[in-house]
Amino acid sequence: MEEALTVEQVDVALTLTFEELAVLLDVMEIEALAGFDREVLNQATPEQLALIKSTAQRGLIARQYISVEDGQLKIEPLVLTMLTACIIPNTTTVIVVNRPDDESELHYLHQAEDVVVAHTPQEEGFHRFIWRRTPEPLVESALIVLDPQTVASLGCPAAIVSESILTQAREVISQGEAAVQSVLRQAGMAEETAVALAHSFMTANTYATLAHIKHQQENEQDGWTLLKAENGLWLVQPVAQPLIDEPVQIKPVTKSQVEEAVIDLLA
């Protein structure tokens, strides 16, 4: 059973069903929320919709997330604070985690002033919200999702190539490691880097793309991708290189360097 929401907790967490979240957004008179799709409800008949909302309301009342006052639904203050941060944040950090032969994970880290809420849409329509109340909540939330493992540095030089080269290299993985190396060598990558990166592509367990959006600065966006593999970690980020189409730098990194990159991006 989920813990009651209290001011004293370091982190505040709640899990809502799709239907419960819809009810809360309706009370707030909010139509849209990143990671929430109303299309399922829009397809329900009026009778079905009334039953769905009634059931969800009872669940919210039972857990004291909402109350009824003078015939009106009122959202519990901590729940309201968390949802408001997700609806009108100053910044949003979106992390998409892809693993071979697995579905993508989508994580939203919303910051509104000093409130940081992690929102993760989950399987079967559940939505997990965590209000991080630690010294560096945004950075810590991102590192929890990225989970960079402690590995020795690969020691090979970084490379600047077109993003399409990395796509081509991944597309020939089924042909074997030598085929991947060939694509990277033909792009002019140093031999040591091509060999190490080819092995990483063959043994990759996670591709995590992080995008940090500043809503108050015309939705200015910056970010990078972390590749986690058997032999090490790689950071892929856009760079300025006028002679290359869609240039990116890919460089081997350590866990501490990933942490530094997160701090630099989100600070």
Image (tube, rainbow, N blue to C red):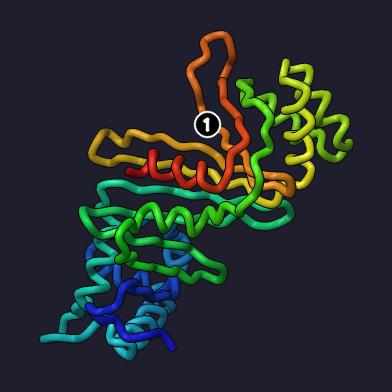
Question: Label 1 belongs to which residue?
Answer: 237
Q: Nearer the viewer, residue 191 or 93?
A: 191
Quarter of the figure with the N terminus: bottom left
Residue located at (53% from left, 53% from top)? 146
The location of residue 81, given as percent across then percent down, is 23, 67
The location of residue 72, given as percent across then percent down, is 16, 81
The number of numbered discs placed on residues in the rendered structure image is 1
Residue located at (38% from left, 39% from top)? 264
The location of residue 243, given as percent across then percent down, is 57, 8
Asked where in the image residue 63 lies, by quadrant, the reply is bottom left
Is residue 244 among the parts visible in the rendering? yes
Is residue 32 among the parts visible in the rendering? no
Left or right of 52 on screen, residue 246: right
Residue located at (61% from left, 30% from top)? 250
Asked where in the image residue 53 lies, by quadrant, the reply is bottom left
Residue 99 position (above or below residue 212):
below
Left or right of 76 on screen, residue 162: right
Residue located at (63% from left, 23% from top)? 159
Asked where in the image residue 56 lies, by quadrant, the reply is bottom left
Q: What element does badge 1 sit on?
A: strand
Residue 245 position (above or below residue 2):
above
Q: Nearer the viewer, residue 188 or 60?
A: 188
The extreme top residue here reads 243
Q: Amino acid at mark 1?
A: Gln
The location of residue 77, given as percent across then percent down, is 19, 74
Residue 229 position (above or below residue 238):
below
Quarter of the figure with the C terminus: top left
- Density class for disc 1 (Cα within 10 Å; few <14, some 14-19, many ≥20) is some
Left or right of 2 on screen, residue 203: right
